[in-house]
Image (tube, rainbow, N blue to C red):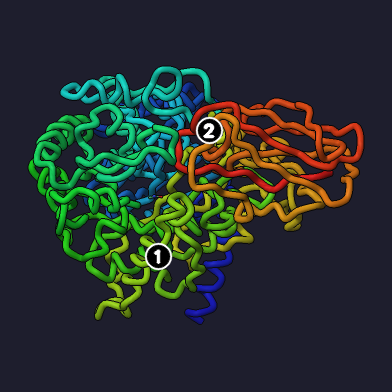
Amino acid sequence: MKRLSFLLFVCAVAWNVSAQNLVPQPVSISRGEGTMMLDTYPRIESSSVELAPLARYLGDFLTGGRVDLTLDPVLELPVEGYRLKVTREGAHITGKDYNGVWNGIQTFLQLLPAPPVITIEDWPLMPYRGVMLDVARTFVPKEQVMRIIDNLARQKINKFHWHLTDNEGWRIEIKSYPLLTQVGAFRGGDSPIWAIYGEWDKKYGGFYTQDDIRQVVDFAAVRGVEIIPEIDLPGHSRAAALSYPEILCSYTPNLSASAGYDTRDVWCISREENYQMLDIIIGEIASLFPSPYIHIGGDEVNTHQWAKDPNCEGLTQAYFTNRLVAIAEKHGKTAAVWNEAAASGQIPKSTLVFGWENVTAARKAAANGYPTVICPGEYFYFDMRQSDSEPGHNWAGVVTTEKVYSFDPERINNIKENRTSSAAEEIYGVEATFFSELLLENETPSPASSAPASHSFVGIEAPLFTSVVMEHGLDFIDYQLFPRVCALAEIGWTPASRRSWADFERRMGLVDDAGKPADTTHPASGTHLARLAEMGIKYRGSKELMRREPEGKLLDVTPTTSITSQRAPIEGDWYLWTFEQPLICREIDVKTGRDHLQRTGFPKGRVEISYDGKNFTKIAELNDLKATVRPEKPVRAIRVVCESHGNGESSTQVQPLRVR
Ligand code: ACM
C-alpha cells in the first residue's frame, strides 16, 4: 500500500511538473486549484535589506500581484534551496539563503503569465553548476558578458568561470603591468600578436578595465553568480610573453618555421622575477573578485620550452603550481587548476581541479582527493559542434544536447569512457607524443582510483572556448550555449530519479506532445524554448540551422586528412592538385587552414586554374582563407598560391578539395 501511494505521488508530480514545463525540473511539487490573482498593482515585500536587489530584479517582470520574499537560514532545506508557495492571493518565496531566493524567483517567473496555485520545494543536486567563457580568443565586450551571465543565472547556473587570458589575448587590466593589455589585448595591424582566425589586416581586440570587472562582478552577485577568474599559467601565455618578453626562458628560439614569429607561450619556471610579477598580478586580481578561488590554468604546458633552458633543469610543473598556490593563498585565495596541473598528486589537496581532458581525468583527480569539477570535453565542451554538418570544434566529437543530458553526475564512476584524442594532441601536433605519454602515465591506477570518494565531485561545468566565434559573430555564443546549457543545468540540479530525456525534450519544446520533432523556429507557447526566445536568446534551432556545404564527391574531406606542412607559409608557397583525367564539375572549393581552427591557413593568396595542365591563370582570390571557383572547362590542375609572409603559426594546412 505504501508503495502504491508512493507511485501515485510520483505520477502526480510528473504530470504537474510537465504541465508547467519547468526547467530545471524541481525536486517536489504539489499543485492546488486555481491561479494567483495578478489584477492588483504589483507589490513585492522582502524580509531583509539583503534581498532588496532581488525585489528590484523581480519588479522588472511583475505587472501585478503580491510576492513576499523571505530569507530563512533555518529553513529545513539544503543550501540554495527554496520553498515557493503560490496561493490565489499571492506568492511566497522563502530561501534558505540569498541564492535560494534567486532560485525561487526564477521558478516563479517560469509560472507566469498565470501562476497556478502550487507549492514547490526545491534544491540543487550539486553545489557547483558552471559555465566557462573564454574571452581571450574572441573578445566579448562587458555588456555581452553581463547578458550571458543573466541568461545563465536564469537557468540556475551559479558559477561563471571567466577565462581571461590565453595565447590570443590578455583581457584584464593589471595596473602594475599596463603592457599586458596595451599590447596583449590586441591582435593584427601593428600588434606583435598576429591576427588569426580570419581577421588578418585590421587591429582588433579589447580588454576590461578594473572598473569594468567590478561592474560585472556586482551584476553577477545580484544574480547569485560567483565569478571565478582564470589567468592561464604557465602555458597559453603568448599574449603575456609578447607584452613582456623577459618572462620567457632564455634561449634563442629557432623562428624559421614560423616565418619569424615568436610562438613561445610558457612562463620561464626558473626566473625568480616571474614569481614576483605573478604575485603582483594575482594580488590585483584577487582584490577584484570576491570568489574564494582563483584559477591559475595549468593545461597543455609545452614543457619543451623549459627543457631548452639549462636554468630550468629538474623543475617540474608541480614546482610551478605549488609556487602559485602559495601566492594565491597569500592573497586569500584557493587555487583552481586544469587536471594536468594536479596529475602529479604533488599539489595541496585543497586545490580545486577541473577534469577536462576526458571522464577518466576527472575521476582520477577525485580519486586523488581533490575537490573536482567535472567538465570532460566529450560531454560538456560547448565549443564542440552539435552535428557533423555544423560549425564548431571536433576534438572531443559531436556534443549534442542529448549527449550533455545523458551524463549522470551521480553515476560518474559507471560512465563508459569514450576516449577521444585530447585537444592538446590536435593543437600541438608535433608534441602529441608528449601529451600521449602524460595520459599513459596517468593510466596507472592509484590505490584509491577504483572507488573515488563521490563527495570529491563538487559539480559540473561547460567550458566554451571561442576560437570559432570570431568568424560567426557573438550570436554564435548563444547558439553554442542554448539549449545545451539547459540540459547541463538540469543534470546538475535534478536527481536522476526525477528526470528523463523524453520529458526534458518535451518541456523544452524540442519535440511536441506526441514526441515528434517540433518546429523550434516557432516554439510552442509555454515551452522553455519559448521563454528563451522571449529573452532574445538566439538558441540553436531559433532559425535555420547553420550548416556547412555538402561534402564533395571527389575526395575524403574529414579534417584529419588535411595536408599539413611543418612550417608557416611564406610568399610564393603553393599547393598543387593535378588530375589524371580532366575533371568535369560545376564548382570547386579550395580551403586553407582547418575548418574548426583556421589559424593554419594562408592569410592572403590566390587560386590558379589550368585547363591544359601547363598554363595557369588566376581564377580567384582567397577570401577568409578560402575560395570557390567555377571552371569554364574540364580542369587539369588547381593551384593555391600564398601571397603573405607567415600565419602566426609553425605549420600550414590545406584541406582536400571539395568538388561539386
Ligand atoms: C583546455 O581545454 N585546454 C582546458
Circles 1 and 2: CB atoms closer than 8 Å: no
Residue 656 position, x and y percent, is 69, 48
In the image, which is nearer the foreground, mark 1 or mark 2?
Answer: 2
Residue 146 position, x and y percent, is 41, 28
Which amino acid type corresponds to the residue marked 1 in the rendered image?
Answer: Ser
Report whether residue 22 is seen.
no
Crowding around mark 2 (Cα neighbors within 10 Å: few <14, some 14 to 19, many 20+) is some
Where does label 1 land, which residue? Answer: 436
Q: Is mark 2 within 8 Å of ligand 1?
A: no
The label shown at residue 525 is none
272 lies above or below 40: below
Residue at left offset 39%, top offset 68%: 360
Residue 603, picture quadrant: top right
Drawn side of residue 15 relative to residue 59, left or right: right
- Provide the secondary structure element on which disc 1 rests: helix
Where does label 2 land, which residue? Answer: 570
Drawn side of residue 307 relative to residue 12, left or right: left
Residue at left offset 54%, top offset 78%: 4
